[in-house]
Image: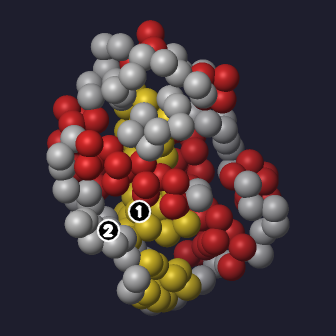
Amino acid sequence: MRKQHLSLRSHIPTFAAIDFETADYGRDSACAVAVVRVEGLAIVDRAHYYIRHPRSHFVFSYVHGISWSDVVDAPTFRQLWPSLQKRLAGVEFLAAHNASFDRSVLRTCCEQARLSAPSQTFQCTVRLARAVCNNYPTKLRDVCRHLRIPLCHHDAGSDAEACARIVIAAIEAGGCLSLQAVPPQV
């Protein structure tokens, strides 16, 4: 996997924070997604969508409060994709807390819908909180408490905005991001 270092002292990136909530253990079970776009250290766009996933059974309603009745009339991931693509256009990277999870949900949903996954790299705000902010523990609620970022945990919109604000805090602190490229689709 190719690594690239991005100096935040000399370049302020355009990026998007993304957060998925899933209905069950399958990575194709995205039932909500939020995207928060940041340009020049300012949040310029927020979007939250429910997603009708392939199964009506929910395992994680107790975590995020989303049930089948919330998504039954929502668009499928394939139907929603053009709106997401528009919001991700031109961003240099995607940020997520525990990015490997959100990256795998995004990749799996794209594969299931026969779509090409975005080519942007992912920045993990867990690693960023450890490296730049020296914050431990690094659960999202702990990092948000440390940085005084409001959070309604497991609400995709709130989680995505929190991730955006963590990256903004790191940029303002003059940190350096280590970006790992998303492996190419096979």
Residue drawn at x 68%, y 69% is: 129
Amino acid bearing label 1: Leu
Horizontal and vertical percent position of residue 56: 42, 17
- Above/below status of 41 relative to 150: below
Query: Relative to 2, is 144 on the left or the right?
Result: right
Q: Badge 2, how many Cα within 10 Å: few under 14, some, many 20+?
A: many
Query: Relative to 179, is 85 on the left or the right?
Result: left
Amino acid bearing label 2: Gln
Q: Write down the residue under mark 1.
A: 94
The quadrant holding residue 163 is bottom right
**Residue 14 visible here:** no
Residue drawn at x 77%, y 75% is: 134
Residue drawn at x 27%, y 28% is: 76
**Farthest residue in the top direction?**
69
Q: For the C terminus, which image quadrant?
A: bottom left
Q: Earlier in the sequence, mark 1 or mark 2?
A: 1
